[in-house]
Amino acid sequence: MDAAGGGELSLAAVRDALVRLEDSVVFALIERARHPRNAPAYAPAGGGGRSLVEFYVREAEALDAKAGHYQKPEDVPFFPQDLPSTLFPTKSSPQVLHPLASLVTVNDAIWKMYFDELLPLFTVDGDDGSYAETVALDFACLQLLSRRIHIGKYVAEVKFKDAPQDYSPLIQAKDSNSLMDLLTFKAVEEKVKKRVEKKGRTFGQNVTLEDNAGGSGFKIDPTVLSKLYDQWVMPLTKDVEVEYLLRRLD
Amino acid sequence: MAARAICTAALLLLAFVCPSAGLSLDTVREFLTREEDTIVFSLIERARYPINRPAYDPVHLGDGRRLNASFAELFIRESEAVQSKAGRYQSLLEIPFFAYRVPFTLAPPYNFTRELYPAAAFVNVNDAIWSMYFNELLPLLAKTGDDGNYAATVDSDLACLQVLSRRINYGRYVAEVKFRGDQQTYTSLIQAKDRDALMKLLTSEAQEDVVKRRVEKKAIVFGQSITSDGPIETSVNNSSGTDFKVDPSVVYKLYDQWVIPLTKQVEVEYLLHRLD
């Protein structure tokens, strides 16, 4: 999250980041949808070993960590234990969040959601043998979804700063449900769903030189994208917001 | 060796049906057309970050030493090594930028159809692609600046390099299809080592024009700023000037000056080895 204006966070900047991430999420899912399910990539290896996807994500995250990737609160690894430390000097970004922000993670839920619920919705049955490419594309999707959802920490911070008198009593009472209500803006959520579906339609169309508006088929069902955001991305983001806020006064 | 026997047995038991798409002019064209979307997406993703020059300079270690390699090269080497272990370069569809010796991969076994002539399958122009990408394309693609996100930046560089490499080195498959379609003509030219005549035979300016204009259109369509209400604006025309995605003329130029010519270079080189 690049806090424009040297450390000053605004709702507009945070919303901007979320909107741009939508494009990335749509692109990444379209690319994954190019391959069929490729189930062997997710099966435990012989003898109860790890699946290929788990092997790959662990290794890729270790490399990312050495490269200084997990310095920001919105970049959260799926396998945090024993991550190597960074080998390269990284630019330090101003601390805009509460120090306990790093404890908040919903990656287990994201992982489960992605493989158990989402993948079957937008990949066709089948096996084309490209397991390594497939898991690399899965990792790209997972990282983007994780980043989007954990930006909830910034959303929560901005909202808190805007109205600390509304949030503080609820935080002190540890009233998660009321916090959730306070954080929910149905109108905004409807807009997000519509926009993400529109992006799915636009970026997933088959572009030809002929002027055929509507085109022949899409690479991904646009309603899967609105469902993704409606049922999982936005609720999980709010979970992050609540989790963050519950620690905000510590 | 025991592992391999077990794998073969597992293969037979599971009897995966590999629908051999079979190589034809149609399947080849389909593949190349789909790659255009991937290329445009990956360029848009890279263009999110500024040029981030320090990622491409020789690495300075904390103790004053300087490595010969850049952060980008080190990261890409390591990433390719992991992907190699995961079985990425088995099918020959992709060729890594850096060579590895991987004693075995962890990928589940799969019976890949070998479409390429074995003696010619190694042909690739990865060195030229690497050079083109960092020296020519990146300066056109990314705006000046440094936001410190080097890992994410180089990750997106790798995505661009991988798809460009796959698309351009696909010339091997294009050449194989064309060879099979007219063995007599190609054979005599190959035996004469007549590069110019081969290049001429492989070139269809009309086809190339269609490809360039289509990929430019894709850059426009996929580069749009989409809002939930209101008209869809193309980034080239929008008055607010923000959220510049990728300049469609850069994508046109990429195909015109590099992708198409390099692909044909691969086709010619492949053919010259086709009778080895």
Image: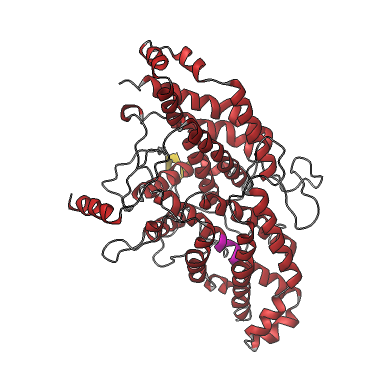
Please give the name of the residue rendered at 62% of the width and 87% of the height, measured from the top-left corner.
Answer: A174
Residue B205, position in %: x, y? 60, 21
Q: Using the image as rendered, state which of residue B212 and residue B153 is in the foreground.
A: B212
Is residue A211 shown left or right of residue B17?
Answer: right
The image quarter containing residue A98 is bottom right
Q: Which residue lies furthest to the bottom in this view?
A: A173
Q: Using the image as rendered, state which of residue B70 and residue A115 is in the foreground.
A: A115
The answer to whether B10 is drawn above or below residue B39 in the figure is below
Residue A136, position in %: x, y? 45, 52
Is residue B144 shown left or right of residue B85?
Answer: right
Please give the name of the residue rendered at 62% of the width and 72% of the height, measured from the top-left corner.
Answer: A235
Residue stretch in magenta: A145-149
The image quarter containing residue A195 is bottom right
Q: What is the total number of numbered labels drawn onto the structure image? A: 0
The image quarter containing residue B214 is top right
Asked whether residue A68 is in view, the answer is no
Please give the name of the residue rendered at 54% of the width and 30% of the height, measured from the top-left corner.
Answer: B259
Residue B154, position in %: x, y? 52, 46
Residue B252: say if magenta. no
Residue A164, position in %: x, y? 73, 79
Asked whether residue A60 is in view, the answer is yes
Question: What is the magenta segment's predominant secondary structure?
Answer: helix
Quarter of the figure that contains the C terminus of chain B: top left
Colour option used: secondary structure
The answer to whether A115 is drawn above or below residue B184 in the figure is below
Is residue A116 shown left or right of residue B101?
Answer: right
Residue A147: say if magenta. yes
The answer to whether B19 is drawn above or below residue A234 in the figure is above
Please give the name of the residue rendered at 49% of the width and 30% of the height, measured from the top-left corner.
Answer: B25
Q: Using the image as rendered, state which of residue A180 and residue B189 is in the foreground.
A: B189
